[in-house]
Amino acid sequence: MKNYIKLLRIQQWYKNLLIYLPLIFGKQLFNVDSLLTVTLGFISLCFISSANYIINDISDLKKDKLHPEKSKRPLASGKITIKEAIFFALLSLILSLIIAINLPFYFLLSVTSMFILTQLYSLYLKNILFIDVILIAINFVIRTISGFFIINIMFSPWLIICPFFLSLFLSIGKRESEARFIKKAYNHRTVLKHYTHELTHTLMVISVVSLIITYTLFTFLSQYPLLILTLPIVVYAIFRYFSFIYTGSVIARHPEKIIKDKPMVISLLIWLISVLFIVYAI
């Protein structure tokens, strides 16, 4: 069972929490019907994510067996067979679509788009410079806008742009960390042949500056101007994550392990509590 859970990569489901952003800033977090519906959407996104991860693991099986970290995955290590992996991929895909079909049509369209884009990424686009990280960022945006579709409220452009630049930062940082701390990393991720240290550093600076500016504008121009008070917390979290990339922390290559870093967890909790207090109590 432990290997099946690892195969589904449940630890990666944190990305789908973006679907709750429209719920929080749309002041519907305590609306039971909206919360339950969005949670169903979250589950659907989790299942489609697992299907994508499994299919990607199958396509990258040969490379993963040679990777110092990915070789420990259930499929690459031989603890789970390809037939079992295919079964769980199909099961996850079907469960996701069953849930999505019973939600608003545009949510179903979002889930389908996410699946198609991820397959295009796995099959070919992940080897194209810049397209690889941009496509990952687009999937972050899809996760967010799917929440708008479910609760049927107007889009906030800031809640689309911020996740986009956040994803760019995380993806580029991951490539920089892999290139620095994994020997011959380009053998495991072909596109790393084109990402030089100078290039990834410049791209990270651009994405970080864009993220901070976008978040600042969001807080200043939103209907909750006191959100500007959360800016120092966000800047601290970004700077700390930046240090993970250049110090060889495993968190830079596996962001889900951020829960093991107490200062980061505390800062994120303070940010969330502050946002909820400003949006719902003031």
Image (cartoon, rainbow, N blue to C red):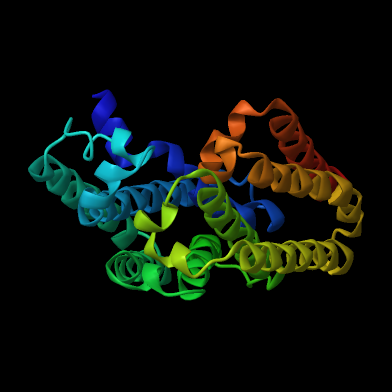
Most foreground residue, 130 or 236: 130
What percent of the width, then of the height, locates residue 61?
Answer: 22, 49
User: Which quadrant does the N terminus fall into?
Assistant: top left
Q: Residue at x 35, y 54 (%)?
A: 188
Judged from this view, the residue extending furthest toward the front is: 184
- Residue at point 52%, 74% (across, down): 130
**Relative horizontal placement of residue 53, taking residue 250 as reference (left or right):** left
Q: Is residue 105 visible?
A: no
- Could you say where residue 128 lies in the image, as x and y percent from the top left? 42, 75
Q: Residue furthest left?
A: 83
- Would residue 178 be visible to someone looking at this image? yes
Which residue is depicted at the point 30% across and 40% down?
8
229 lies left or right of 34: right
In the image, residue 218 sits, relative to residue 247, either above or below, namely below
Q: Nearer the viewer, residue 50 or 176?
A: 176
Position of residue 191 measured from the top left corner of the image (x, y, whole percent): 43, 66
Residue found at x 40% / y 53% = 45
Residue 267 in the image: x percent, y percent? 77, 36
Of 133 and 161, which appears nearest the observer?
133
| 188 in relation to 248, above or below | below
* Above-or-below relation of 256 to 147: above
The mark total stands at 0
